[in-house]
Image (cartoon, rainbow, N blue to C red):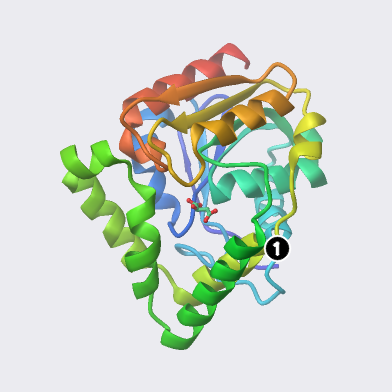
């Protein structure tokens, strides 16, 4: 297994945040600036993104989970608050399946516990083939990026939209194709969530079209005692679109439960 690149900032309770697709860990820029003042923030680049190499294994989110668990071992972190946004949430659920004891608290942002319907999985595999054939991330800019941001961000914060577009344009097409194939194969995670016995916060942008508030509520209903926070004026990338609200929610949650 190749070691994951990562950021490690601040001191205190360790919070590990797993980024969404198709971004590198720089997606957490506003969390690096905000949350790392209050706690220790570890942000891996998942395999095939940012500075982490594309995996040579068959596409499977378990490979990403194993990479994160390997990193926690290298950092001597045996229990952390684990957070994931969208694809990062899917990976967090894989970690819960493998090593639930490392998760002392859980933050699931703009993600869902259901598997893809057949048409959605087919679309991911089509996109993976386009990425592999074209060897450029154009299809991500044209087909994925427009679905990520909420209407409010598109209208009122074009600089955020531009920043995220630049990150997408830097995506390695091989890494993005691998991740699409891995996400297409992911299982339903409701049974996994029903086993969770640690404090859990589910965050969702009110304008999230990919993992809308109904998906967030379904996860809250699955995890005993979970709480939900809906962020107004944010879409699927709530951490980047409404960073102050996101940071306050997550910081309060982590400090309250540490
Ligand atoms: C993400 O933001 O990570 C993606 O929207 C996940 C997905 O495609 O399901």
Residue bearing mark 1 = 185
Percent of width and height locating residue 53: 55, 70
What is the quadrant of the C terminus in the image?
top right
Q: Residue at x 60, y 70 (%)?
A: 122
How many marks are shown on the rendered structure? 1
Percent of width and height locating residue 26: 38, 51
Q: Residue at x 47, y 87 (%)?
A: 133
Farthest top residue?
Answer: 256
Does residue 162 appear left or right of residue 218 in this picture? left
From the viewer's side, name the closer residue of 126 and 89: 126
Farthest front residue?
Answer: 119
Q: Image height check: is 2 above or below 74?
A: below
Farthest bottom residue?
Answer: 133
Percent of width and height locating residue 206: 40, 30
Q: Residues within 10 Å of mark 1 (few under 14, many from 20)?
A: some
What is the quadrant of the N terminus in the image?
bottom right
Q: Residue at x 60, y 27 (%)?
A: 217
- Residue 198 seen in render: yes
User: Callout 1: helix, strand or loop?
Assistant: loop
Q: Residue at x 45, y 62 (%)?
A: 50
- Is label 1's Cβ within 8 Å of ligand 1? no
From the viewer's side, name the closer residue of 27 and 183: 183
From the viewer's side, name the closer residue of 14 and 245: 245
Residue 228 location, quadrant: top right
Percent of width and height locating residue 157: 19, 40
- Residue 15 seen in render: no
Q: Image height check: is 200 above or below 63?
A: above
């Amino acid at each position: 297994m190749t070691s994951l690149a990562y950021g490690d900032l601040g001191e205190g309770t360790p919070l590990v945040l797993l980024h969404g697709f198709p971004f590198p860990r720089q997606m957490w820029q506003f969390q690096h600036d905000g949350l790392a003042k209050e706690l220790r923030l570890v942000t891996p680049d998942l395999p095939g993104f940012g500075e982490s190499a594309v995996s040579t294994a068959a596409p499977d989110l378990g490979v990403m989970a194993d990479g994160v668990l390997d990193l926690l071992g290298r950092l001597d972190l045996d229990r952390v608050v684990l957070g994931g946004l969208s694809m990062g949430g899917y990976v967090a659920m894989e970690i819960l399946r493998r090593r639930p004891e490392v998760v002392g608290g859980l933050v699931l942002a703009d993600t869902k516990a259901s598997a893809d319907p057949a048409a959605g999985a087919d679309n991911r595999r089509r996109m993976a083939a386009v990425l592999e054939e074209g060897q450029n991330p154009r299809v991500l800019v044209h087909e994925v990026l427009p679905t990520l941001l909420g209407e409010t961000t598109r209208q009122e914060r074009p600089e955020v939209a531009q920043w995220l577009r630049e990150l997408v344009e830097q995506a390695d097409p091989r890494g993005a194709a691998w991740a699409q194939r891995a996400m297409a194969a992911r299982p339903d995670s409701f049974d996994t969530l029903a086993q969770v016995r640690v404090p859990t916060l589910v965050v969702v942008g009110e304008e999230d079209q990919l993992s809308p508030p109904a998906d967030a509520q379904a996860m809250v209903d699955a995890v005993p005692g979970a709480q939900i926070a809906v962020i107004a004026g944010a879409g699927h990338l709530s951490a980047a679109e409404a960073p102050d609200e996101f940071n306050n929610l997550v910081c309060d949650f982590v400090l309250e439960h540490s």
